[in-house]
Amino acid sequence: MFLVFNKEKIYAYLVSAITVIVLFFSAGMLINNKDSIIETSAQAQKKLPIYNVDVKDKKIAFTMNCAWNDDDIDKILQVLEDNDVKITFFIVGDWLDKYNESAKKIYQAGHEIRKS
C-alpha cells in the first residue's frame, strides 16, 4: 500500500491538527478558569442549590425541610431557642397549607422560611 500526499492533503491534515490543538487548549483554559461559567438553555431555567460559599469566618448554615408532618415542630423550635440558633426552614409541597399554624410559629420564632 502506498500513501500519496499531495499539497492539498498536507494542508488539510495540517489545518485539522491545528484545529484539534486549539480546541484542546481552549477546553483546558475553560476547565482551569474557575470563574468561567458556561450556561446552557437548560441551566438558565433551572436554579441550582448553593452548597458552599467561600468566607473568612467559620460559619455553618442549618436548614430543615418541612415535607411530611408537624409533629416535632414545637420540640425543634424549643431546642433552637434554648441554644439561641436561627435556621432556614424549607417548606416543601403543600405543607404550608396543611400546617399553617406551625408555619406561623416558625416565623414568630424568628426563623427564615423559604418555599421550595
Image (spheres, rainbow, N blue to C red):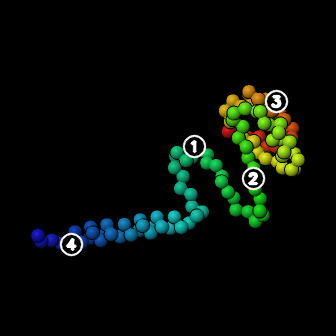
Could you tell me if the residues under marks 1 and 2 are in contact, i.e. CB atoms within 8 Å?
A: no
Q: Which residue is mark 2?
A: 61
Please determine whether, in this image, residue 44 is positioned above or below residue 8.
Answer: above
What amino acid type should be assigned to the residue bearing mark 3?
Answer: Glu
What amino acid type should be assigned to the residue bearing mark 4?
Answer: Lys
Mark on residue 7? Answer: 4
What amino acid type should be assigned to the residue bearing mark 1?
Answer: Gln
Disc 2 on helix, strand or loop? Answer: loop
Could you tell me if the residues under marks 3 and 1 are in contact, i.e. CB atoms within 8 Å?
A: no
User: Mark 4 or 1 closer to N-term?
Assistant: 4
> Could you tell me which quadrant the N terminus lies in?
bottom left
Q: Which residue is mark 1?
A: 45
Mark on residue 101? Answer: 3
User: Mark 4 or 3 closer to N-term?
Assistant: 4
Instruction: Select label 2 or label 4 by which is in front.
Output: 2
Res. 12 image quadrant: bottom left
Mark 3 crowdedness (10 Å alpha carbons): few <14, some 14-19, many ≥20: few
Q: Is residue 110 visible?
A: no
Q: In the orientation shown, which residue stands out farthest toward the top?
A: 98
Instruction: Select label 4 or label 3 by which is in front.
Output: 3
Q: Residue at x 76, y 29 (%)?
A: 99
Res. 14 image quadrant: bottom left
